[in-house]
Amino acid sequence: MNVHDSERLAGMLEDAGYERAGSGDADVVVFNTCAVRENADNRLYGTLGHMRPAKDRNPNMQIAVGGCLAQKDRDTIVKRAPWVDVVFGTHNLGSLPTLLERARHNEEAEVEILEALDVFPSTLPARRESAYSGWVSVSVGCNNTCTFCIVPALRGKEKDRRPGEILAEVQALVSEGVLEVTLLGQNVNAYGVEFGDRFAFGKLLRSCGEIEGLERVRFTSPHPRDFTDDVIEAMAATPNVCPQLHMPLQSGSDRILKAMRRSYRSERYLNILRNVREAMPDAAITTDIIVGFPGETEEDFEATLEVVRQARFSSAFTFQYSKRPGTPAAELPDQLPKEVVQQRYDRLIELQNEISWAENKNLVGRPVELLVAEGEGRKDAETHRLSGRARDGRLVHFTPTGAVDREIRPGDVVHTTITRAAPHHLVADTDISSHRRTRAGDHWEEGVRPKTSGVTLGLPSFGAPAPQPIAEQGCAC
């Protein structure tokens, strides 16, 4: 979500007359921050400290800090780093150009933190970073009260976009050659709560299936409490919805889930996974897990390991519990010692790596369709491979030989066969069987990235939108 917010900030600044700067010569530097984990605080203030010499050398350079940490810390940022010019929160992204101008005119820091949205973020322009894949918000905020999470306090209550707006934005991206969209929400499958349709998210997925040229649809993140069979049916019945599901677990202990206020229990969670795999046997399921929540016993942790063994996740984002001031969990007794948390964390990582590797080995010998990616393979230059994402979201490093139509570019589509597995990726070292050049690949080669105008609010509607005019294009350099 922060990545997509940053695309909005870039779009607004471009509309205000700014251009993306080269290395080291920026007139404006904007930090869009996160506050989910403690290291975000440390990294921000450390980085702001490193910025001070540049500010001293060029007093006219402006530094702005926005996002969740700005919403949380407010005036504290300017007190700790008085060389910061602008502080803005999660509810007023659209204020940035005005605040920069005001700070420049008044020659003093401008701090503006709103308690509710002034405009829905998707009404703002966005300079997209990818030529082939785009983020599309379905909602902002969250109505859950998980005791470890500070997001609802910083992002506010859930606000849903109208379906027609979402589909219009998807169509605008597809019109510019984008092949893949990811629908974003703090809790995507609660989408529709504002306009009273509990089946709205499944309908939205089906409507995405009607958009010609849209090849892949993903979404993140759902909540097990709100996950319905209707969504599973929509995923299975809609060809361009990818067989991939990111379903946060957080803990496999029912006692800890209750302390977290997660409103489901381990058996309910595993039943959802069984239903997904019954409808989509090859679905790749990923998750989030927190280790060391206050009061977690060895028995609780063993329960998490058991759920992981049964769930057979393709991968997991694992976190050591981070105490966030202002959350109920921060005040709980029995905060665990660091060494206990670290030891459990290492055991969980070891188990999940074993499972991920075993699941990936099952794919050796299978054909795979890849959307060629940019910057996903750190060793591609030395291995002479390229990298892409399979429809199930797995990362595949492949050898670009065989049926190649001129050069393979990010955004192109290739078909190949898996030859080797590792815990966190797959390798395809056989010749590719086909290569399809795409408009997204053309745009990547030309340095063109989509720029979408804001989509205004409207009435609820479902179904594929009317064709949209091609939006203005621009260079990302």
Image (cartoon, rainbow, N blue to C red):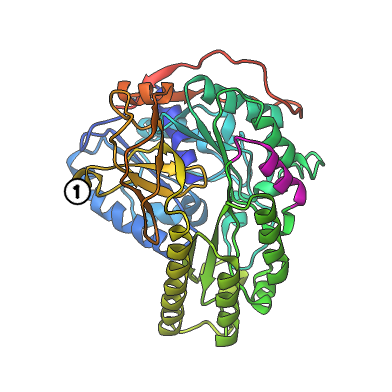
Q: Residue at x 63, y 35 (%)?
A: 239
Left or right placement of residue 452 versus residue 120 in this view: left
Q: Residue at x 61, y 45 (%)?
A: 185
Residue 368 x/y as whole percent: 45, 42
Q: Which residue is mark 1?
A: 53
Q: Is residue 226 magenta?
A: no
In the depicted view, which residue is nearer to us: 93 or 1? 1
Above or below — where is 252 with respect to 399?
below
> Looking at the rendering, which quadrant does residue 458 occupy?
top right
Q: Is residue 242 visible?
A: yes
Q: Is residue 230 magenta?
A: yes
Left or right placement of residue 47 versus residue 25 in this view: right
Q: Residue at x 61, y 33 (%)?
A: 119
Q: Which residues are magenta?
A: 228-241
- Residue at the far right: name it: 196
Figure label count: 1
Left or right placement of residue 47 versus residue 381 in this view: right
> Looking at the rendering, which quadrant does residue 346 occupy?
bottom left
In the depicted view, which residue is nearer to us: 58 or 340? 340
Residue 361 x/y as whole percent: 43, 60
Q: Residue at x 76, y 27 (%)?
A: 461
> Looking at the rendering, which quadrant does residue 38 occupy?
bottom left
Mark 1 residue crowding within 10 angstroms, few (<14) / some (14–19) / many (20+): few
In the depicted view, which residue is nearer to us: 369 or 17? 369
In the depicted view, which residue is nearer to us: 393 or 422? 422
Q: Tag 1: residue type?
A: Pro
Circle 1: element type: helix
Point out the image quarter for the C terminus: top left
Magenta-highlighted stretch: main secondary structure? helix
Residue 143 x/y as whole percent: 70, 54
